Image: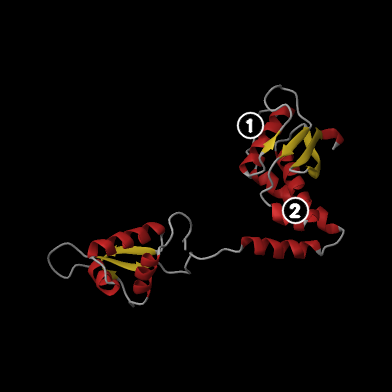
Amino acid sequence: MTSGGGDPVTPRRRTVLEVLRGAGGPLGVNEVAERVGVHANTARFHLDALVTRGVVERSLEAPSGRGRPRAVYAPRRGMDRGGRREYRLLARMLLSRLATAGADAEAEAVEAGRAWGRHLVDPAPPFHTVTGREAVDRLVGLLADLGFDPVTPADDETDEMPDVIRLRHCPFLELAEEYRQIVCPLHLGLMKGALAALDAPVAADRLEPFAEPDVCHAHVVPARTA
């Protein structure tokens, strides 16, 4: 089991966490070690790991006399962030609902993608006029960040604006196969929004899903003809 990414919450750490949750109050290292049945150094190691994970909080107990205040540990309040995630199921639920919009579903998907494309693209500097080639390069960079593995035929070999971006990977492949009428227009809208946000002289005209068996084609045209 993991908790928010990174190293897993191991069975021993899960036991330590359960002891803290059942304690009714903060515990010191020796108390945790005794209840788990391990050496104090082992308990401290797992406690520190859980603190790093963000599921346990460490604090200093108010001193009752001379000496250093004692470190105590307690579970962080809130729902356990470990366990499974079902984001694909959530996406399917939302897409299935959008798909019932009938003839409006594709247009709604394009508009949703357009809004996010405007938000996600890195803006051009003030007073800078974006060329067609630069706009395509910026769009390719955004698509790469999102996992589309894009390439252009010219691909840095010329300053001419390419008219096709080849998308060699779909980060939403299974969803695109099931809800192509929604997911692919969403991608097209994202590209339209990104280029519009750059005030680019080019626009995303259309998207050909699986134009090749393993590649989709995004067509770019001068903005006045889009």
The residue that label 1 is drawn on is 126
**Circle 1 Cα neighbour tier, 10 Å, few/some/many (<14 / 14–19 / ≥20):** few
The answer to which image quadrant residue 149 occupies is top right
Element on which disc 2 rests: helix
- Please name the residue shown 47% across and 63% down the image: 1
* Image quarter of residue 123: top right
Nearer to me, 45 or 204: 45
Expressed as whole percent of the image width and height from the top left, the position of residue 163 reads: 79, 31
| Image x and y of residue 167, in percent | 72, 40
Circle 2 is placed at which residue position?
A: 183
Q: Are marks 2 and 1 in contact (CB under 8 Å)?
A: no
For marks 2 and 1, the one nearer the N-term is 1
Q: Amino acid at mark 1?
A: Pro
Distance Cα–Cα, label 2 vs label 1: 33 Å
Question: Residue 225: x, y in percent?
Answer: 86, 35
**Drawn side of residue 212 relative to residue 11, left or right:** right
- Residue 85 circle label: none
